[in-house]
Image (cartoon, rainbow, N blue to C red):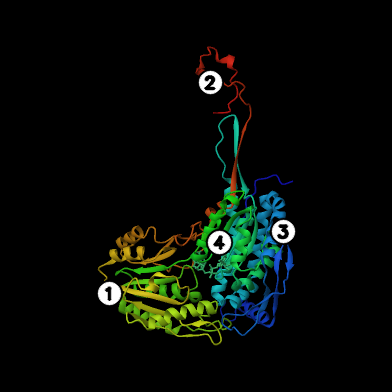
Amino acid sequence: MANGFFNVPAPKNEPVKGYAPGSPERRELQAMLKQLKQEEKDIPMYIGGEQVRTGNLQRISPPHDHQHTLGHFHLGSAEHVQQAIDAALAARTRWAELPWQERAAIFLKAAELLAGPYRARLNAATMLGQSKNAFQAEIDSACELIDFFRFNVHFMQQIYQQQPESAPGMWNRLEHRPLEGFLFALTPFNFTSIAGNLPTAPAMMGNVVVWKPANTQVYSAQVLMELFQEAGVPDGVINLVYVDGPTAGEVIFKHRDFAGIHFTGSTGVFNNVWKTIGENVATYRTYPRVVGETGGKDFIIAHSSANAKEVSTAISRGAFEFQGQKCSAASRVYIPSNLWDDVRGYLIEDLKSMKMGDVEDFSNFINAVIDEKSFDKLARYIDAAKNDDSVEILVGGGHDKSKGYFIEPTILVAQDPQYVTMCEELFGPVLTLHVYDSQQFEKTLELVDGTSPYALTGAVFAKDRYAVDLATKKLTNAAGNFYINDKPTGAVVGQQPFGGARASGTNDKAGSILNLLRWVSPRTIKETFVPPVDYRYPFLGVDNHEDLNVTGKGGF
Ligand SMILES: NC(=O)c1ccc[n+]([C@@H]2O[C@H](COP(=O)([O-])OP(=O)(O)OC[C@H]3O[C@@H](n4cnc5c(N)ncnc54)[C@H](O)[C@@H]3O)[C@@H](O)[C@H]2O)c1
Ligand SMILES: N[C@@H](CCC=O)C(=O)O
């Protein structure tokens, strides 16, 4: 029996630990890195709570040291996707009927486990498996995911609390049902927190999920799965499979009970997913919810009144943290001619001081890019720029994959503001910069708005408030997350709800109430206490209203 209106604890953002030399968190993380490097993990899929091994082993190695083996995962097939759907559907009724406060408790517990005993493990797995430095792992896999759990539980309560008005004689209620079927969480390599949030946000709202991570994130995905299990997510509610994308899509998007997808990844993949869902729409029991946060070509534009040092620091951090592999990373920059000499000098100084290498050396700011495919793509763009007279390589340009997939942080200066790397998402530590005539700020804003199909993040730097206002208006649709005098990365759950429009996605703002609303299907319940017993309106000519016996107030 659970009679009461419960309030979940007020959410607060998890403080970011510093990992200073000699600090306890640094010692714990270093010990964990050492331990994980000595182990060779055997990583199963998780279907209906069972560990599933196929023997089709795929090697996992750190991107910064590709000869080292961290472990192997068991690759599945279409049959495992089908089993995962079956397990999800078998778990559905019991999970959907569990009182919401029990679901909330599970994810609040997950937050506490991650803030405590799981923190070093998940951070270390993210550092080794995805080549993130300690600070980047901390803000992603620990803090952001803890925030997702705590804030989403709070938003869940707000959703359930929203109730309609009731006129006299009746009671109107809104019930937020889970979707009818199963959800598919298709997650990217670059943020462990996103991999954790995409299956748990719908699960929290009472849905059951089949989760397929990127192969390059499986190492930390397994730690997430263990965390979910320890927090009390029941068997079958979240099922983790490792299959290639098209194999998963072939089974999932043809299934009658497919009720929605929670996707983050590239625009190309999402476009395909959307098209396939459209082709199969008549198959489904209910119109599926399609939520996808996708690519970006994020900008920084400085006005002639901006502070050159603030601009260059935002570029150094906004473009190169985690090797530029954030969907939010600045990758095209517009500098006014009057600031160029200063910005240029500061950028060269910053980039030359960035140390690159292994994640175990905490003084390295830059680590490796995720895999050989990404390395080769980035190297191709850099080499093409080297051979193009209209482009100057201001700094960087080196690449080496002998030990790990290392690309030097690189700045290209393009005369042509439509040069290919000003328009396409490269997803690596390569920034392209264009110097514009400082008198042409407004015209350059139009260029910023029209150059790329994406609209994820962007920043303006200016001291002049008229310039800030003009940029904010002119760039209304150019970014879902717009920053004034700040870098365009590092959105915090509960503070800057995250997501973009145009080719950057459906803008359902991860870590906000808007996202959770996508995972429920409301049912309105109207109850009339004393129903009417005569169909006639008063004006139908009956003289004595008493005769009508119009006591019911059931409305129209
Ligand atoms: N907007 C955001 O919030 C956000 C956040 C993080 C990353 N991203 C974007 O994600 C991309 C980087 O991540 P990624 O390289 O893992 O993305 P990706 O699109 O290559 O992969 C995403 C997921 O889709 C799967 N997949 C790939 N091809 C598929 C197919 N044909 N059918 C079905 N599934 C398929 C992958 O295995 C992976 O699980 C970048 O474009 C980045 O901008 C966006
Ligand atoms: N939310 C993160 C980016 C996630 C995409 O990769 C940020 O704001 O930097």
Mark 3 and mark 2: span between their CA atoms? 54 Å
Disc with the residue nearer the chain's start (1 vs 2): 1
**Three-letter amino acid code at disc 2?**
Tyr
Determine whether the residue tagged by mark 1 lies in a helix, strand or loop: helix
- The residue labelled by disc 4 is 263
Query: Which of 354/213 is in front?
Result: 213
Q: Residues within 10 Å of mark 4 (few under 14, many from 20)?
A: many
**Three-letter amino acid code at disc 4?**
Phe
Between label 3 and label 4, give the one nearer the viewer: 4
Determine whether the residue tagged by mark 4 lies in a helix, strand or loop: strand
Mark 3 and mark 1: span between their CA atoms? 61 Å
- The residue labelled by disc 1 is 338
**Three-letter amino acid code at disc 3?**
Pro
**Three-letter amino acid code at disc 1?**
Asn
Disc with the residue nearer the chain's start (3 vs 4): 3
Q: Does the beta carbon at disc 4 come under 8 Å from ligand 1? A: yes
Q: Quadrant of ligand 1?
A: bottom right
- The residue labelled by disc 3 is 234
Determine whether the residue tagged by mark 2 lies in a helix, strand or loop: loop
Disc with the residue nearer the chain's start (3 vs 1): 3
Q: Residues within 10 Å of mark 1 (few under 14, many from 20)?
A: some
Between label 1 and label 2, give the one nearer the viewer: 2
Query: Which of 29/300 is in front?
Result: 300
